[in-house]
Image (cartoon, rainbow, N blue to C red):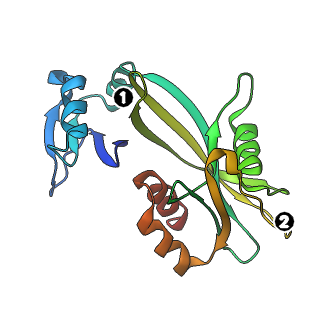
Amino acid sequence: MYKVFVNDKPIILTDSLPKENKYHVYLFKNLIVSEILKKLTSNSVNGVLIFCDNLERSKELFFKNFKIISAAGGLVLNPKKEVLLIYRNNIWDLPKGWIEKNESIETAAIREVEEECGIFNLKIIKPLTTTYHIYNQKGFMLKQTHWFLMTSDYERELVPQIEEGITKVIFKNKKATNEALKNSYANIKLVYDTYREG
């Protein structure tokens, strides 16, 4: 299954239909992508489920409808297992950003976390997940973000990257993180859930 979000509403590509489903179901072979996007952006539906005969091939064909922007970021833990969160545009988020030309995904993830949070001594533990969301910027773009679980023992003051709209950078414990995620994006909740599930 792949989840691609549009304004926090999911497009779910799947090759197995769930027993319970609250979304409109479409067959991939009959899919008109522009119609789906119109419905999701006009608030006429809360999400869609697209049934695919061949999931990987369908994902490949679906993604060809968009200019793909690649990004990388991190879910960073300190020695107390608290999670590093940023506050950007009045929403709690995880640090991430675009991958530069000739830059590896891992290097981009570390660089972006360092730049956005003023933190150092980062170590990648493992890849976590990849998230997808579609946004409209002179045409629909698909941003795919590669997420890594990271650690840092950095103890100095963290510095938010103000020019990127970040006003706070803070480590939060489990309870505070769960509270903050009530005011976050569906993709960020997905990254955190992936981390919690191990």
Under tag 2, what secondary structure? loop
Q: Nearer the viewer, residue 23 or 181?
A: 181
Pointer 2 with pointer 1, Cβ within 8 A: no
Write down the quadrant of residue 24 in the picture. Answer: top left
Asked if residue 70 shows in the view, the reply is yes
Q: Tell me the CA gap for discs 2 and 1.
A: 39 Å
Left or right position of 136 against 195? left
Locate residue 140, reporting x and y percent. Answer: 38, 25
Give the mark nearer the N terminus: 2 vs 1.
1
Kind of residue sitting beneath label 2: Tyr
Q: In the rendered view, tell whether residue 139 sits above or below residue 98.
A: above
- Does the image show residue 52? no
Residue shown at 79% from the left, 63% from the top: 152
Image coordinates for residue 115, horizontal then vertical, percent: 76, 47
Q: Which residue is mark 2?
A: 154
* Residue at the spot 16% in from the left edge and 45% down from the top edge: 45
Q: Is residue 80 above or below residue 30?
A: below
